[in-house]
């Protein structure tokens, strides 16, 4: 079924197999023919056709009918497709009627000016991908909820004057509206998920149009219609009947929601989740009708807009659901289940779709709180008062969803977080004014109050989360809350502080709340999800870099350094190599910022660094070298001697690599027996894969490497380490420490031995080692300087480079190695001078290979320029 448009939905009915009943197949073409009509939404045949289509999808065929191609439709079978298409047509119908009604009010010039501070600038629900709207089902992450039509522009008003007549009491829309409450009530728990999703969209469209009718009826612009007499009375009666239907829909949703909340479900336990097949099923599939009930409720709440309701919002109309009940109300009816049920769905429900949908409901409730007049702040007090039941539910729900194991739920929590924080800041700005702000704290801290220790750490960590949607959205939220640092690009992300930023901006807020932030980061370093552990390590590194190096805020973080280092040391044993990688870099950053505080743990950290230097993953080896360079920067000559000892020991390690031909290596890689009978995993696998220190963990990727480390990888790590030492300390005029200089007495023997080791070719991975050498040699040459490198170091590698350049004639050499050699030759020639470099190659007969490489480079650059011009045109 295709629900992307009403025409596609109707056309889909004829393609369903087995064929649908004959009446459905006859009705859908007739409705398709009516679609181009300009008076479509006042056409009785169209409205009644929609009702008939939904009726055919709600009742079973009474006899056995013969379909096309001889297929039979069994008696008593109810086909859901006509109902789904009918609901899709209803959503479109009501949205168009709502837009027309808004234009009527605008043309009369009587539409109230909306207070921009009372609503969000964006609607952050999530569409269902079916043309309507919904809340966190399928489709994009942050589109608009169903029926949230904006105010018409002047161009819209001038182009669509045909749609500006007021509604009449005999309009077919009222016949449709009278029938919808029963249809919704009947199908809110339909067995087909697509029908339930469309029911949720219909609820939102119904609520939007119903409340828009009240707005129109109450507008002063309708004074011109006072002479209509009996017609106006009938119209008012019809509108009031629609309101009765709207409230009955709301009651049906709440009854169904309460019933599903009372159902027993598997308890969500972080240690056991997804380990059994039944738990995995409950954690991923749609959970009965509870999810779509929440979708429908969110759409209904978002549809209740305008001054037609008390205070102009859902919460104003249903205020008893959000306040502590009095003794009389408790005896009459217990309504506490509503907020507690939403909290239950967000925090402990086993199904991730339910948790995300519940967070979306809370989001539109926050939006509803802001939909009130300037003089009526009762609803907004639900967000501000620290003992408000609604605020307490929001607090616990955000605590859980912003740290959920599923990115879908974490995204829903991030949307809720932005909406709540934005609302609190608006309320604070209105109530406090310019004179009531404390210059020592940010507006965020003043507005959010007791929520800061819970919200701030989660907002910080989600800026590094692996899922791009969560990461980018959280980074954007951070900029909206704390602004952009002075002198920085708006696209630059991170903690910042400037003289123009009140309270030190995000950097000041984090520093003042260092204790909860550090505790949360340390806890997340031991989280079940490897993506969370990786993000936590990145967050810890940011603390060291931004807070630790700040003259005003460094002392705030100092008491927590030991705790953070312990968390990072634990991550060194992680079976996910990205986590080990980030922990390694973070420790180096901490050593620079807090050298004295790190001294007690330095021996352990140094041992972990040297282990990482021989890791199976090349990027881990490189970042271990970066961390060791940071250690030399922090601790000076004593640390340099320890690092040089590691280099001298590990450079010759490739000589111990066992001999193996390329054919033997390829055969080993393609050995079917070695890859048979192993556990298979995919990105969506539900089984625990990545473990932290041997304990079961849940992740979405398998980064586990279990092969033994090879001797050549130690030599490879030393190449990265030599690059770091040269770039940081080779030049005495630009060294990071005046007491540390890599003189030629130290460096030349190491480079000579490295060149000899890289000439070995008795093992197939030697090409990988030379690839690393050619990639790191240009930055080493630039750090040493033209004269120094040309005089002492160029001749060590020139013959090996020339040989690698000439290996492109099918010798079996890796193409990566050949390409890296060509890139290295081009960069070295640019640094030293192309004539001098070619002259050195002539001495060993390598000038022709060099000329060929340079010609290829020029050809590639020409093609890139041509392609660039074509793209611009």
Image (spheres, rainbow, N blue to C red):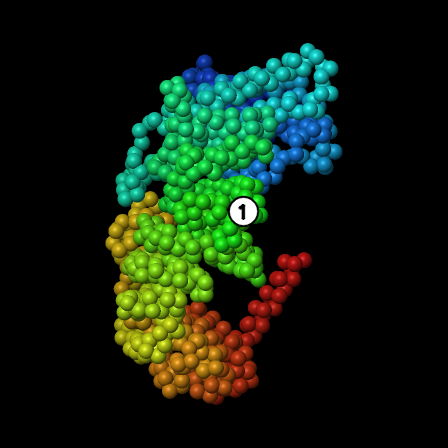
Circle 1 — which element? Answer: loop
Q: In this view, does 712 lie to the left or right of 208?
A: left
Report whether 493 appears left or right of 540.
right
Note whether 837 is above or below 212 in the view shown.
below
Residue closest to the eye, 837 or 566:
566
Residue at 49% over, 54% down: 440
Q: Which of the 4 image quadrants contains residue 266? A: top left
Counting every numbered tag in the picture gives: 1
| Number of residues whose C-alpha sits closer than 10 Å to that of mark 1, classed few (under 14), some (14–19) or many (20 or more) | few
Q: Where is residue 325 in the image (x, y as percent from the top left)?
A: 41, 25
Which residue is disc 1 drawn over? 436
At x 47%, y 75%, the residue is 779
Residue 602 image point, x, y percent: 30, 68
Q: Which residue is drawn at 38% across and 60% down?
A: 557
Is residue 38 visible to the viewer in this orientation of the structure? Answer: no
Image-quadrant location for residue 799: bottom left
Image quadrant in which you'd find residue 588: bottom left
The x, y position of residue 387, in whole percent, is 41, 36
The quarter of the image holding the C terminus is bottom right
**Nearest the eye: 679 or 572:** 572
């Amino acid at each position: 079924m295709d629900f992307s448009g009403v025409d596609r939905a109707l056309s889909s009915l004829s393609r369903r197999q087995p064929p649908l009943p004959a009446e459905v197949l006859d009705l859908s073409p007739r409705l398709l023919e009516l679609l181009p009509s300009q008076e479509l939404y006042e056409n009785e045949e169209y409205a009644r056709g929609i009702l008939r289509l939904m009726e055919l999808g709600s009742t079973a065929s009474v006899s056995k009918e013969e379909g096309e191609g001889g297929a039979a439709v069994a008696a008593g079978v109810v086909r859901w497709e006509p109902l789904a298409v009918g609901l899709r047509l209803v959503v479109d119908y009501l949205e168009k009627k709502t837009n027309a009604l808004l234009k009527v009010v605008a043309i009369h010039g009587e539409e109230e000016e909306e207070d921009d501070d009372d609503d969000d600038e964006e609607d952050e629900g999530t569409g269902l991908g079916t043309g309507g709207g919904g809340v966190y089902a399928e489709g994009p992450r942050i589109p608009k909820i169903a029926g949230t039509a904006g105010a018409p522009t002047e161009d819209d008003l001038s182009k669509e004057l045909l749609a500006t007549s007021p509604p009449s009491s005999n309009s077919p829309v009222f016949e449709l509206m009278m029938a919808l409450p029963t249809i919704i009530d009947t199908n809110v728990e339909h067995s087909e998920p697509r029908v339930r999703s469309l029911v949720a969209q219909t609820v939102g469209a119904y609520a939007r149009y119903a409340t828009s009718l009240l707005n129109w009826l109450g507008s002063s612009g309708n004074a011109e219609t006072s002479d209509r007499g009996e017609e106006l009375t009938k119209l008012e009666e019809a509108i009031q009947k629609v309101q009765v239907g709207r409230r009955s829909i709301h009651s049906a949703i709440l009854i169904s929601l309460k019933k599903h909340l009372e159902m027993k479900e598997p308890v969500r336990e972080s240690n056991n989740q997804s380990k059994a097949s039944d738990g995995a099923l409950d954690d991923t599939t749609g959970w009965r009708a509870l999810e779509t009930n929440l979708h429908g409720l969110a759409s209904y709440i978002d549809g209740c807009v305008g001054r037609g309701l008390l205070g102009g919002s859902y919460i104003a109309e249903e205020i008893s659901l959000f306040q502590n009940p009095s003794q009389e109300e408790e005896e009459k009816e217990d309504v506490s289940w509503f907020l507690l049920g939403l909290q239950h769905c967000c925090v402990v429900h086993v199904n991730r779709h339910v948790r995300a949908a519940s967070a979306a409901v809370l989001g539109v409730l926050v939006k509803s709180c802001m939909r009130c007049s300037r003089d009526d702040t009762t609803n907004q007090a639900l967000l501000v008062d620290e003992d408000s039941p609604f605020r307490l539910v929001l607090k616990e729900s955000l605590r859980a969803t912003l740290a959920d194991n599923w990115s879908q739920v974490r995204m829903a929590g991030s949307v809720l977080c932005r909406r709540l924080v934005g609302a609190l800041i608006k309320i604070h700005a209105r109530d406090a004014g310019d004179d009531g702000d404390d210059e020592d704290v940010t507006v965020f801290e003043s507005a959010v109050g007791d929520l800061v220790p819970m919200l701030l750490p989660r907002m910080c960590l989600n800026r590094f989360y692996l899922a791009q949607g969560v990461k980018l959205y959280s980074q954007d939220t951070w900029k909206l809350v704390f602004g952009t640092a002075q002198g920085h690009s708006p696209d630059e992300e991170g903690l910042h502080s400037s003289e123009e930023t009140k309270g030190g901006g995000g950097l000041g807020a984090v520093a003042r709340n260092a204790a909860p932030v550090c505790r949360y980061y340390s806890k997340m370093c031991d989280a079940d999800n490897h993506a969370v552990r990786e993000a936590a390590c990145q967050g810890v590194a940011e603390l060291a870099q931004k807070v630790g190096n700040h003259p005003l805020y460094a002392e705030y973080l100092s008491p927590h350094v030991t705790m953070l280092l312990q968390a990072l040391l634990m991550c060194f044993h992680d079976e996910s190599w990205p986590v080990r990688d980030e922990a390694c870099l973070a420790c180096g950053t901490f050593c620079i910022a807090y050298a004295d505080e790190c001294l007690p743990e330095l021996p352990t950290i140094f041992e972990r660094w040297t282990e990482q230097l021989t890791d199976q993953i090349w990027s881990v080896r490189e970042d271990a070298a970066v961390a060791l360079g940071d250690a030399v920067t922090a601790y000076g000559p004593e640390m340099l001697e320890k690092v040089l000892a590691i280099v001298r020991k590990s450079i010759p390690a490739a000589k111990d690599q066992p001999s193996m031909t390329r054919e033997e290596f390829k055969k080993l890689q393609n050995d079917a027996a070695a890859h048979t009978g192993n556990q298979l995993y995919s990105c969506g696998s539900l089984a625990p894969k990545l473990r932290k220190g041997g304990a079961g963990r849940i992740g979405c990727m398998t980064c586990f490497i279990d092969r033994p480390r090879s001797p050549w990888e130690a030599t490879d790590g030393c190449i990265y380490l030599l690059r770091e030492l040269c770039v940081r300390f080779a030049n005495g005029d630009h060294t990071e420490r005046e007491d540390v200089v890599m003189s030629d007495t130290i460096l030349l023997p190491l480079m000579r031995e490295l060149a000899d080791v890289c000439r070995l070719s008795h093992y197939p991975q030697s090409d990988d080692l030379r690839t690393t050498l050619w990639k790191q040699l240009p930055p080493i040459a630039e750090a040493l300087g033209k004269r120094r490198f040309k005089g002492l170091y160029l001749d060590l590698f020139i013959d090996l480079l020339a040989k690698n350049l000439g290996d492109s004639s099918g010798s079996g050499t890796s193409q990566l190695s050949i390409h890296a050699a060509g890139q290295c030759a081009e960069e070295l020639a640019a640094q030293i001078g192309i004539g001098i470099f070619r002259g050195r190659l002539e001495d060993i007969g390598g000038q022709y290979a060099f000329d060929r490489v340079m010609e290829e480079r020029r050809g590639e650059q020409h093609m890139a320029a041509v392609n660039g011009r074509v793209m611009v045109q």
